[in-house]
Image (spheres, rainbow, N blue to C red):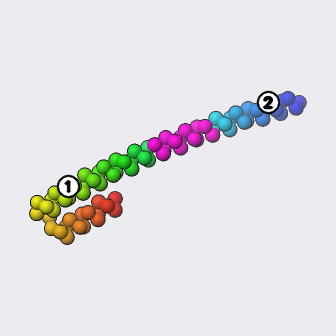
Amino acid sequence: MIIVIYVLIFFILIFVAIIGFKAAGAGIEAKKRNKSDVQIRKKNISKDLSRLSKLYTSGAITKKEFQKAKNKVLKN
């Protein structure tokens, strides 16, 4: 009878370990995705600021419009 209990405990332990490894893998993947998303957002911010700077230096937008657009880009 005690052997049956040990076998059940062993299977439960294996089951819990498998669930733990799956959760850890999902967490690692989420961290990688989040890191790449942050890098993409940084690239977009620099592109947007560069575009705004060109518009401002060419005289297409006023200083007030430039500041407003810059603040909007930096908040996103």
Amino acid type indicated by mark 1? Arg
Q: List the single residue furthest toward the bottom.
A: 64
Q: List the single residue furthest toward the left.
A: 59
Residue 11 spot, x, y in % from top left = 73, 32
Residue 25 located left or right of residue 10: left
Residue 40 located left or right of residue 47: right
Residue 38 spot, x, y in % from top left = 39, 50
Q: Reply yes or no: does residue 63 show up in magenta.
A: no
Identify the main secondary structure in magenta. helix
Crowd band around label 2 with a 10 angstrom C-alpha radius: few (<14), some (14–19), many (20+) = few
Residue behind mark 2: 7
Q: Secondary structure at mark 2?
A: helix
Residue behind mark 1: 51
Q: CA distance from mark 1 to mark 2?
A: 66 Å
Query: Compared to 72, does 5 lie above or below?
Result: above
Q: Earlier in the sequence, mark 1 or mark 2?
A: 2
Query: Compared to 70, does 37 lie above or below?
Result: above
Q: Residue 70: name its quadrant.
A: bottom left
Query: Compared to 75, does 30 lie above or below?
Result: above
Residue 38 located left or right of residue 1: left
Name the one closer to the observer, 11 or 52: 52
